[in-house]
Amino acid sequence: MNKQELIDILSDSTKNDWLFKEADRVRRENIGDEVHLRGLIEFSNICKRQCKYCGLRSPNKEVERYRILKDDIIKTAANAVTLGYRTIVLQSGEDDYYDTDKMVEIIRELKKNDIALTLSIGEKTYDEYKAFKSAGADRYLLRIETTDENLYKEMHPHASYENRKRCLYDLKSLGFETGTGCLVGLPNQTIDSLADDILFFKELDADMVGIGPFIPHEQTPLKDSQKGDFWLALKVMALTRINLPDINIPATTAMETLNPNGRIIALNSGANVVMPNVTSTEYRAKYEIYPGKICINDQPEKCRGCIEGKIKSIGRKISKEKGFRKK
Ligand code: 5AD
Ligand code: FES
């Protein structure tokens, strides 16, 4: 679709039902009914950055910060493997404690399991990404967040839009399956820029795209802003599916936070991935990117069973494979 077509659909709520059905059909015809589960380990909530929307931003002194060290990351991953996960996602704030050497050690250890490994640890240099790749990491998630440069600047003090893009193109060129995505409902975000976001996913040839509604966090400068709209986020996701038919698209946790059935609705509107949390319960509440995050009191076993039940209830099945993009 061209930009005008994207804008027309995004601005017209009478087309929603058609759009969600169409995205569901495109998903089924291109990649089938299997849902890939990714076990998410939130291993550090320490972050040097100041993204205005994020509860983990460095100026937030009310967060109790934690780091999970190598041995416990390995144990958490082993448990996830026992639960049947074929992909582990390591996510953290931008925490310089985990330098290249430490990350490479962790990657090598985790890759002793028969799993795909995804990193989601922020902006790094080309050489760092290269070291992660050589150590065995398969995928990398880094949302562009918004392609509206002015909004990007406003939302990310002391950060550079150019560098974020550079990271994504470096990751692609190094052979990572590269995931990106955006927030929907940031203050002053326009429909026009959401259309640009989708065109950007296409231009990058993203292998995975995660889309979630913005949820204001009490301890951030955006605490009084309006929350994002669940249905608009779902529309951006559905349009992403239609325009990138074979990629992986998660039903995001933020969607479930705004709508108790959010992940199932997303799976029926183009999504084919879910990323349940496998972090041990003692840390979950502290990884508060936004409030109301689901499952903060649950054990990894519980989430696995819960999501499995939900997926089966809509007639889909859980993949036993690593779930690389099928081009
Ligand atoms: N609401 C929704 N999503 C958020 N993220 C960060 N802060 C918020 C918020 N307040 C998302 C960002 C980031 C991902 C890990 O979490 O898009 O890339
Ligand atoms: Fe955690 Fe449902 S996914 S309890």
Image (tube, grey):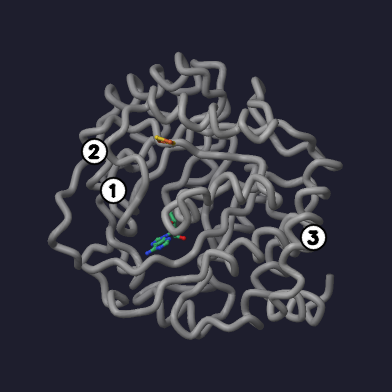
Q: Is residue 37 left or right of residue 159?
A: right
Residue at left offset 43%, top offset 22%: 80
Query: For the C terminus, which image quadrant?
Result: top right
Looking at the rendered structure, the secondary structure element under dot 2 is helix
Which mark is on residue 267?
none
Going from the N terminus, do you reach mark 3 or mark 1 first?
Answer: 3
Mark 2 and mark 1: Cα distance apart in space: 7 Å
Whole-percent x, y for residue 229 in the image: 51, 70
Going from the N terminus, do you reach mark 2 or mark 3 first?
Answer: 3
Q: Is residue 324 visible?
A: yes
Q: Tell me if label 3 and label 1 are in contact, CB under 8 Å.
A: no
Q: Is residue 134 visible?
A: no
Q: Tell me if label 2 and label 1 are in contact, CB under 8 Å.
A: yes
Q: Nearer the viewer, residue 294 or 81?
A: 294
Q: Amino acid at mark 3?
A: Asn
Q: Nearer the viewer, residue 290 or 75?
A: 290
Residue indicated by mark 1: 287
Residue at left offset 23%, top offset 47%: 286
Q: In the image, is the residue at mark 2 within 8 Å of ligand 2 by its beta carbon?
A: no
Mark 3 and mark 1: Cα distance apart in space: 33 Å
Which mark is on residue 243?
3
Residue at left offset 35%, top offset 75%: 158
